[in-house]
Image (cartoon, rainbow, N blue to C red):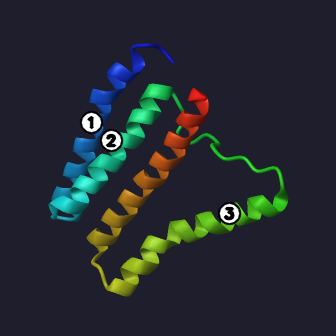
Amino acid sequence: MTERAPKVALPVAGLFGAVSGAVVYYFLLPDWFPALATAATYAGASYFYLAFDIPLLGTHVKFTDRTDRVGYAVGLFGVSVGPLALSEYAGLSSSAVIGVVAWQLGLLAFLLLSATAAHRRS
């Protein structure tokens, strides 16, 4: 990581967050609160992606034990289908469901990228 990378990454991440929040607001959930949450989540995720040059689709969590891998897979399945199940239960419209799923994808990216960045720093 170069000394300049965080200085460039922060404004670009802010721009990416603003764009993602605007897309959510104008096309999916016309409410400022979920749009702001989505914007902040994607800004944070993109900062770590840009500042630390972390592969987005690379492996971030590795388990060698088979039982651990199965537990991780089951947990990821639950995290993945949770918003869909909750949205159906609440009777949300399709655009609201897509907005919730878009936010959750950013949430997962943020958590994985920030944890990977923290491990690289130490």
- Residue extending farthest to the front is 122
Mark 1–mark 2 contact, CB under 8 Å? yes
At 47% from the left and 14% from the top, the residue drawn is: 2
According to the picture, the residue beneath numbered tag 2 turns out to be: 43
The quadrant of the picture occupied by the C terminus is top right
Q: Position of residue 81 (x, y in %)?
A: 51, 72
Q: Quadrant of residue 93?
A: bottom left
According to the picture, the residue beneath numbered tag 1 turns out to be: 14
Residue 59 drawn above or below residue 25: above
In space, the residues marked 1 and 2 are separated at their CA atoms by: 5 Å
Sequence-first tag of 1 and 2? 1
Q: Position of residue 102 (x, y in %)?
A: 37, 58
Q: Quadrant of residue 60?
A: top right
Residue 51 drawn above or below residue 114: above
Q: Nearer the viewer, residue 96 or 3?
A: 3
Judged left or right of residue 55, residue 6 is left
Residue 8 drawn above or below residue 60: above
Sequence-first tag of 1 and 3? 1
Sequence-first tag of 3 and 2? 2
Q: Quadrant of residue 13?
A: top left
Q: Nearer the viewer, residue 91 or 6?
A: 6
**Could you say whether the residue bearing mark 2 is in a helix, strand or loop?**
helix
Crowding near the residue tagged with mark 2, few <14, some 14–19, many ≥20 C-alpha atoms within 10 Å: many
Judged left or right of residue 67, residue 80 is left
In space, the residues marked 3 and 2 are separated at their CA atoms by: 27 Å
Judged left or right of residue 34, residue 52 is right
**Amino acid type, residue under disc 2 in the picture:** Ala
At 28% from the left and 42% from the top, the residue drawn is: 17
Looking at the rendered structure, which numbered label has been put on residue 73? 3
